[in-house]
Amino acid sequence: MSDPVRILHFADIHVGVENYGGTDPQTGLSNRVRDFLRRMDEMITYARDHEVDLTIFAGDAFKTRTPNPTYQREFAWRVLDLAALAPIVLLVGNHDLPPTLMKATSIEIYKVLNVPNVWVADDYEVRVVPTKRGDVVVGAAPYPMRSRVLRDVNTGGMTIAETDAYMLRELNAILDNLAAEADQYDLPRLLTGHLAISGAKEGSERLIKFGRDITVPPSSVADARWDYVALGHIHQHQNLTVGRTGVPPVVYSGSLERIDFGEEREPKGFCWVNLERHHTAWDFHRVHARPFRTLRIDLRESLDPTADAVAAIEEADLDEAVVRVVIQLTQETAARLNSALIRDALIRANVGYIAGIKREIEQAARARLGASPEELTDIELVERYFLSKGTEDARRSVLLGEAEALFAQDVVDEG
């Protein structure tokens, strides 16, 4: 019996994300860009040490569809490192696609130059890929462009809903055809797709998404004709078939690095797959993604708010983290708070980047519907709305937590 084929599955690199970071004087790159590249280097080291046989990159190499040449160069070096170890499949994601069908994708250059060991999977197809431990059948499902899936269909008289429904039927048929073609081979089989699957937990990718997704039902990919389904597009790692029998693991590897505070609590990493027909095993391996920390400090009853805030910072684990501080205050304690000393304390705590120091000042008339909206913070306005609707305390608390996550991008930097 042959050994399982060792497969590296990762996705959603988004080289070019620069928020929450300054410029590295040695390289001229954003510190945040370097974070993303370091995560790739960490992953490549693991793949080399564990003798990878095949790499599946499930799409979205860059933040934008037209990355600058420096980012393309940095990504290319790492593609070549992986290709030197084993064949690599570069699946086209929505961030890799050009604005129009006739233009090139951001990763098409590897195909044009015929780079050895690199398959740019920009169309729906099945290939048999030779590896050191045997052949593998790989089905590729790049991000579904309407102009490609519906290129032979006249949608002029259709509504948006009708077009989307037709698009979903066509996409389901394509996925079924890929499985049927793979089923002709008595070999381990893997489907890789850059797709939105219904039921998957979305995260911060919705904030940088291009286009309108067609959401595919899990049954379209959780097909026993595959042994593993390697997905990209959604940044939160998850297995959509956990606990189910008779179907393959349908896995989003998630992104390698955090984009913003919406991903603060999400583990980041890649998947390592031991692929066998009917007996596939896999693990999720965490990488050392830069931590994001929200430090909430309640100083409404503090006699020395500055000293108490500094003490809270010194007690927290903020080393190399992107940090935002949210301070609850009254009008009286706000007047005694020294923001400069708080910033100094954050610097001494060796934070990677100060995302913001936000004051939430409690108003005397906070809960009254007659209070002036200008006196309230964004989250207080949302809370006032829930109060006006008579929302129960427990549910209001949950909803306010979700609202705070949505406001994460709007944290005001006191400096």
Image (tube, grey):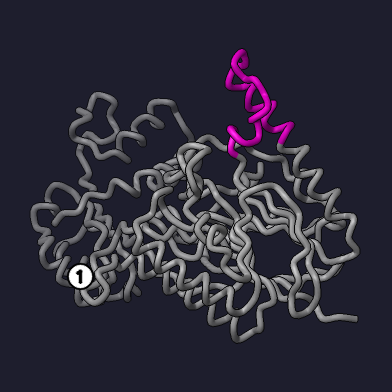
Which residue is label 1 attached to? Answer: 310
In the rendered image, the residue lying farthest to the front is 113
Give the class, few, some or many, for how many residues have Cα within 10 Å of label 1's Cα (few <14, many ≥20).
some
Name the kind of residue labelled 1 in the image: Val
Question: Left or right: where does residue 25 sit relative to residue 251?
Answer: left
x and y, in percent, of residue 387 in the image: 39, 31
Whether residue 93 is situated above or below residue 187 in the rendered picture: above
The residue under the point 42% across, 44% down is 207
In x, y percent, where is residue 26? 24, 77
Residue pictured at 62% horizontal, 46% vertical = 195
The image shows residue 324 at horizontal and vertical percentages of: 29, 59
What stretch of residues is rendered in magenta? Answer: 145-170
Residue 139 shown left or right of residue 23 in the figure = right
* Residue 221 seen in the current view: yes
Q: Is residue 165 magenta?
A: yes
Q: Quadrant of the N terminus?
A: bottom right
